[in-house]
Amino acid sequence: MNEISPQILKGSLSLIILKLLSENDAMYGYEICQRVKEITAGQMRVTEGALYPALHKLEGEGLLRTHTELVEGRTRKYYAIVPDQRGQAVSRLAQMQVFLENLQQVLNPQPELKLT
Amino acid sequence: MSLTYDQQKNLRSLIDNAGAGTYQEVRDELYDHLMQAVESRMEAEGVPFTEAQHEALEEMGGASGLKKIEFGYMQVAEKQVWRMFKAFFPVYFKSMRWLIPLVLGLTINQYTWVSVVAIFGYLVLIPPALGSWHSWDLGLKSSGFPVSLKMYTLKKRTALLLPTLGLVCSLLLEIQVQGIIPIALLITVYTLADYCLTFIQHTRKTLLEVAK
């Protein structure tokens, strides 16, 4: 199967980030990239050029908060969902879920059963 | 696998030479990412440092990719500043409190009125000028050292209080032209206090977030 188109990925990157962070306390940029690659068996590759702006944008919107830790002599920045905003994050993910279900209907419509 | 001191220095230079080392926060983040990408490649694939470094940099979009990441970070911070301006000004001017000093100034004499009008001229003109992209960018380029984006954002936001300089100038003008007129002085001080308190009230949360 071919790799996912970057355009499709770009539109859903913030949701991918929110989903991963909702399942983990805090993650850093490289960890997020690797986790996506791992879950999708390499089908989806999040580029750093797309990831960091998306992370910073979510931070700017107030959905994510950051903290830094010193790891092996260098500063590592961790991202986590702001506890107060968890509800909003979950809501966005739920909306996406509904959208995907509807999209699935459009792309693969189930044939109607007609009783004769 | 830990990199040697020279290899680490090499990676830092890579980021600085790409022009993405202006802000401390971005520099640290990119450096950490690059280090991990290089280390994991060297460990998993057994490639030498130069090859791992080249591949990791390519994956990040090369030098231009690093610069773009910094640019994106800066844009987000810039938007936060503008959002604060846009939230504050309509609230302040819709309240119509700013009319009080103008009307009072007019009832005293023309000089007081002119100085109060000048106050509001500063209030309207200076913050957007200070909040502009170019003033930020130029200020950073002159420094030459990585600056903390958070601290710079904080300074830029509190620069909204700089119109107080305009107020002080207006006050001095009043004193020079008319001598000290208590009522004019009161009007100027009232305008200053009202503006500052409103600004702090509406931006306190944002300022505290940036400062931490």
Image (cartoon, coloured by chain):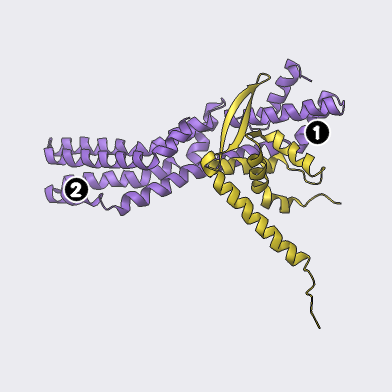
The chain that appears yellow in the image is A
User: Do marks 1 and 2 both belong to one polypeptide chain?
Assistant: yes
Q: Is residue A11 above or below residue A102?
A: above
Q: What residue type is labelled 2?
A: Trp
Q: Residue B55: which numbered mark, if any? A: 1
**Whole-number angstrom distance, CA of label 1 to CA of label 2:** 66 Å
For this orientation, the residue located farthest to the bottom is A116
Question: Which residue is disc 2 drawn over?
Answer: B113
Query: Who's the residue at 74% across and 28% down the image?
Result: B36
Residue A35 in percent (x, y) is at: 74, 38
Give the mark toward the camera: 1 or 2. Answer: 1
What amino acid is found at the position of numbered circle 1 in the picture? Glu
Q: Using the image as rendered, state which of residue A22 and residue B141 is in the foreground.
A: A22
Q: Which residue lies furthest to the top in this view?
A: B5
Which residue lies at the image location 51% right of the left edge and 35% below the top edge? B138
Side (left or right) of B194 relative to B210: left
What chain does mark 2 sit on?
Answer: B
